[in-house]
Amino acid sequence: MRRLRQLLLLPLLLLFAVLPAQAERLVSTVSRSEVAITSSFSGEVLTFFGNIEPEAGAAQRFVEGPFHVIITITGPLQDRVARRMTNNLGIWINTEQVLFERFPSYYHVLSDTRLTEITDPVTLAELDIPLPAQADVSAGEQWWNAYAFGNELVRLMVKEGLFGLNEQGVVFRSETFYLAQIELPSDVVPGTFLARTYLFKHGELIAERADRFSVRKIGFERFLGLAAEQQPLLYGLAAVLLALFTGWLGGVVFRR
Amino acid sequence: MQIYLPIAELSMNLFFLVGIGGAVGFLSGLFGVGGGFLLTPLLIFSGVPAPVAVASVTGQVVAASTSGALSYYRRGGIDLHLAMYLVLSGVLGAFGGVATFSALNVAGHLDLVISVGFLVLLGFVGTLMLVEAIRAMLKRRAGVVVREKLPNQHNWIHGLPMRIRFKRSRLYISVLPVIGIGLCIGFVGSLLGIGGGFILVPALVYLLRVPGNVVIGTSLLQVVAMMAVTLVLHAVTNQSVDILLAFCLMVGGTVGAQFGASAGKYLRGEQLRAMLAVLVLAVAIRFGLTLVLPPADLYSMAVAAGGLR
């Protein structure tokens, strides 16, 4: 069955390749595929760039715009809770909370112009591009609650700079060559980041690319992180010894 | 100079960390308390996640109390027998405290419990200390000779069974209140990330009538042991001890504590206690206000426990 499908697909592919129709290809990359967290890490600037060119083997020599680019950068997923305070007998406490599973720790959208001018809201929503789309509101019967909390959570993430939308973030340096920059904050969650680049022309999505980069602790920071996770008892004892030693040393140094 | 804290997963200014460690260490050397009750809120206020702040400050308290405890030990200012009972019961309490800490963290009530806990404890202890210190000051001004040792008056606590003789403290009292105090301090201390010195000292003085020359040393030893156990428990159950953060605070703290201790020699006991009381009350009021004043933002967020996927 599978082989049959392959056999059917092959002529189709050939047909597309031969067709002189407009076919654009997106070539994209990230300035660094690995961001290393060292002891002096205080954030990092990353550059995304790419070019739009004719599909390999296509007859045309150049592509015609106008093109629009949307880049989304999604950080490692975490379970996050949004909480609401209410006044109970004069005391403000967190009474309600909604858990959002697999919520991005970082999400930024960059585009070369306003999203509404690039394509219609339905397409944007289908691609899960808008910021509020990151909060999964399929939380059972209390979906309206999850919806309200989800919007508040996204608002808080924007306030912290962990979420953002920059509609002038992508800059075209020529008809086809674009450039975009983001600044990873120092409290970025280490892990794999996914950068999706969407290419639009006349409101239609014509190409899509995904690039990955990872943010990792290296050296001593990595060693400490792993030790705390994998050898918690030894790590704790080491912390105690360090504290006792520092205290003792302080006493010795200052004793007259 | 920024330094990356691998467990808190953010970078902070090294000088800021050593600086607040030093400032709090100065106060702890001056007053003979661990200083956790000041340092934990300061760190949380500067953006360190609450679980990491509470757990890492524990390390700073161990270091700050160690140098103090050693110098008291050399002067014979520790009742080891009494300290042993306090430590053993304190360790039991700490297990309960750390377990409660994890459970509250999951349920989302940790912030509330920490706020209310600080408010009640600090408010109560601060008021007691202030009243006592002002009374002592007034008496001194009136020309009454202030007794250095508290009277041998017995209260109901001294009537309890299972009495044991504590030689250095010159006490013959029941072990039950000693164990009770140890349990409470252990529980509260590990829950709130404080050494509990500022509760233990008044408890030993007013409840057990432990003489002044061994109170501070014994309390410091108890704090060292308790906080060491709590540190290990936090590392094992929550994995929230940031050793680099703790180390920066320790370095500042031990240096600051030495200066604080020498500055303390120029002040009289009741003056010191009055100042500490005001400080404790100020922190309590700060916590009280956050509970009562309408928050700037009704919503807040946090990474769920065991969050990273």
Image (cartoon, coloured by chain):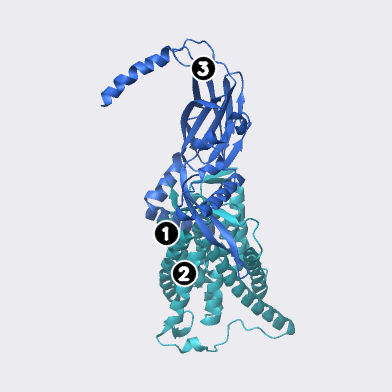
Question: For the residue carrying disc 1, how many other residues have a C-alpha within 10 Å: few (<14), some (14-19), or many (20+)?
Answer: many
Question: For the residue carrying disc 3, how many other residues have a C-alpha within 10 Å: few (<14), some (14-19), or many (20+)?
Answer: some
Q: Name the residue under label 1.
A: B232
Same chain, labels 1 and 3: no
Give the residue type that dot 2 points to. Phe
At 60% across and 18% down in the image, what residue appears? Answer: A175
How far apart in space, not on screen, are marks 1 and 3 (Cα)? 59 Å
Q: Mark 3 points at which residue?
A: A53
Residues marked 1 and 3 touching at CB (< 8 Å)? no
Q: Where is residue B184 in the image (x, y as percent from the top left)?
A: 48, 73
The residue closer to the viewer here, B69 or B309, is B309
Badge number at residue A101: none
Q: Chain A is drawn in which colour?
A: blue
Give the residue type that dot 3 points to. Glu
Q: Is mark 1 on a helix, strand or loop?
A: helix
Same chain, labels 2 and 1: yes
Q: Can residue B58 be seen in this view?
A: yes
Q: Chain drawn cyan, letter?
A: B
In the picture, the quarter occupied by the N terminus of chain A is top left
Q: Name the residue under label 2.
A: B187
How far apart in space, not on screen, are marks 2 and 1 (Cα)? 15 Å
Q: Position of residue A113 (x, y in %)?
A: 63, 29
B77 vs A15, left or right, is right
Q: Can residue A127 be seen in this view?
A: no
Give the residue type that dot 1 points to. Val
Mark nearest the camera among 3 and 2 is 3
Q: Position of residue B129 (x, y in %)?
A: 62, 76
Note whether A50 is above or below B223 in the view shown: above
The residue closer to the viewer here, A71 or A199, is A199
